[in-house]
Amino acid sequence: MRLELFMAHRLVHGANNKVSTSVVKIAIASVALSVAVMIVSMAVIIGFKNEIMDKVVGFGSCINIVNRESSANLETLPISSQQDFYPSIENENGISHIQRFVIKPAIFKAGQDISGVVLKGVGSEYDWSFFQRNLLEGNVLTSDDTSSQRQILISKKMSDLLKLKVGDNLVAYFIQDPPRMRKYYISGIYSTGLEEYDKTFAMVDIRDLQKLNGWKEDQITGFEVMIDDFNRLDEMTELVRDFAGYKILDDGSMMKVASVKDNNHALFDWITLTEMNVWVILAIMFFVAFVNMSTALLIIIFEKASMIGLLKAIGSTNWLIRKIFILQSLYILLKGIIIGNIIALLIILAQHFGHLIPLDASSYYVDHVPCDLQFWYFVAIDFATILVMSVMLVIPSFAISKMQPAKVIGFK
């Protein structure tokens, strides 16, 4: 065993001074707390981002293709579903699915209760995986031409407001010329926790909304495009724009291609702000850990001043002695990191599975603090902590160079 490793090991495990023992315990606790806070912060922010993105994309899509002339008040102009990119664009690398949709505003009435909603009509190719994960009761819509009842999927928020359950009927009124109404059979109830969307959207068959609008079977509001990797959203948006964004329709209008970021600026700005907060937290925690470790190292160095003087007197170099104390500090650092990892893992597991900390869904888009359980950020935080601390701990070790053997050998 190298001399510096042997002596660092003896200093860590053979120390019996109350001062140094207390300082070591405080340093370990500080590192453990800092590492735990950094890991939990990463887990929460990544959890927030993934949870919200999953819900926003689940309600809509990664990329939308609609008529450029459609107004912002949900009264959309149709485009033809007979496009050369549908459904062949699914064969493009990075594109996982494309589906048709029609949207139409309506008013629900059940007894004396009313609610304004947006009906979203979907076809047989619609991917129901998101709603199946968030389904509370009943079933999603079925594309059954023989069914005599018009099915509808509504949210738990709507069902509570209108006092309805699966199997009940509700009436939807459409403000158009002439005004129309439809009676729907509630096939299922979902809840995503994304309150802004839950209170707005209900799902119906695309053919029903086409008839209400007086559209042909091939006329739709637009297409929804799903992609394999959300990190490639901008790249895939440009790809879809190349396919559809520059085409001129028969009526002289063009199609507009917009990503989920384009349609939800405020939400993505909020997510970006929270990500910036994580970097601030990480910087503060690194600083706290460094200050505490540096303080502990300096106290240990001055406490062992007589030993340092003796080592210098027998010919040890300053760098050899500094390495002894840096290695001792790394022992302390590693112990703190291990404890911090255990604390962080317990907190993340408890919140991930137990949802112990609730949130106001109307303000935070989710009803609990989401914690994403992945181990790569454990490794990333641990590696960054060891790397940064190893470099930074060299600074307080320079105090050893200033010590003169004649003055410190008898220091107590």
Image (cartoon, helix red, strand yellow):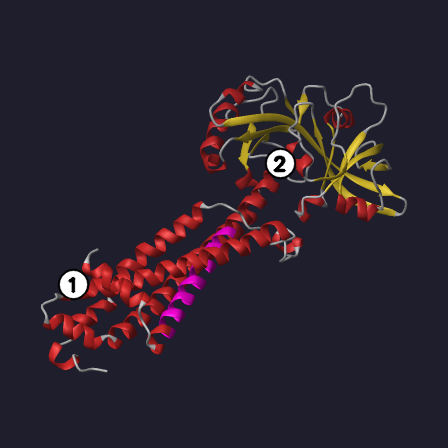
Determine if residue 181 is in view. Answer: no
**Residue 100 lies in magenta, yes or no?**
no
- Which residue corresponds to mark 1? 319
Image location (x, y in percent) of residue 159: 80, 44
Circle 1 sits in a helix, a strand or a loop, which is it? helix
What's the residue type where badge 2 is placed?
Answer: Gly
Q: Look at the image and give the residue range highlighted in magenta.
A: 22-43
Residue 392 horizontal/vertical position (percent): 28, 62
Q: What's the residue at 50%, 37% (across, down)? A: 230
Q: Which mark is residue 60?
A: 2
Q: How many labels sit on residues? A: 2
Q: Residue at x 56, y 48 (%)?
A: 267
Give above or below for 66 relative to 42. above
* Image point (61%, 49%), residue name: 353
Badge 1 or badge 2: first in the primary sequence: 2
CA separation in Å, label 1 and label 2: 62 Å
Q: Nearer the viewer, residue 189 or 174?
A: 189
Secondary structure of the residue carrying tag 2 is loop
Answer left or right for 193 relative to 254: right
- Quadrant including the C terminus: bottom left
Amino acid type indicated by mark 1 = Trp
